Amino acid sequence: MKIVVAIAFILIIGSLASAFFFLMRDKGKTNNTVRALAVRVGLSIALFAALLLANKLGYIHPTGIRT
């Protein structure tokens, strides 16, 4: 599960970087920035749903705060 979360974070950061690239290159003339940000939001929601599902199925366990 750690690998899945790490890959998802890399994809989210990559989508954010591509949105920044399109914003700088296109100067807002195309919809590429909006599309890349929409992909980022979709990936974030999918990651959140996957974490909830993994918790429900017992693949991950909450550990609480350790001091």
Image (tube, rainbow, N blue to C red):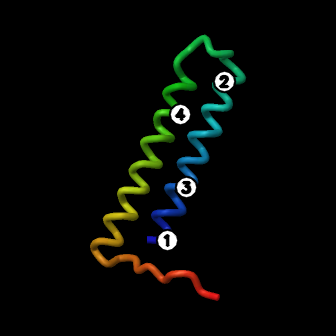
The residue to which callout 4 is attached is: 37
Q: Of the residues under marks 3 and 1, which one precedes in the sequence?
A: 1
The residue to which callout 1 is attached is: 2
Asked whether the residues under the numbered discs 2 and 1 touch, taking CB atoms below 8 Å apart as contact, a structural biologist would say no
Q: Residues within 10 Å of mark 3 (few under 14, many from 20)?
A: some
In the current view of this chain or complex, which residue is farthest to the top? 29
Secondary structure state at the residue bearing disc 3: helix
Secondary structure state at the residue bearing disc 2: helix
The residue to which callout 2 is attached is: 23
The residue to which callout 3 is attached is: 9
C-alpha gap between disc 3 and disc 2: 21 Å
Q: Residues within 10 Å of mark 1 (few under 14, many from 20)?
A: few
Q: Give the amino acid at mark 3.
A: Phe
Q: Position of residue 65 (x, y in %)?
A: 57, 81
Q: Quadrant of the C terminus?
A: bottom right
Q: Residues within 10 Å of mark 4 (few under 14, many from 20)?
A: some
Q: Is 38 situated left or right of 10 in this image?
A: left
- The residue mark sitting in front, 4 or 1, is 4
- Residue drawn at 27 percent across, 74 percent down: 57
- Number of on-image labels: 4
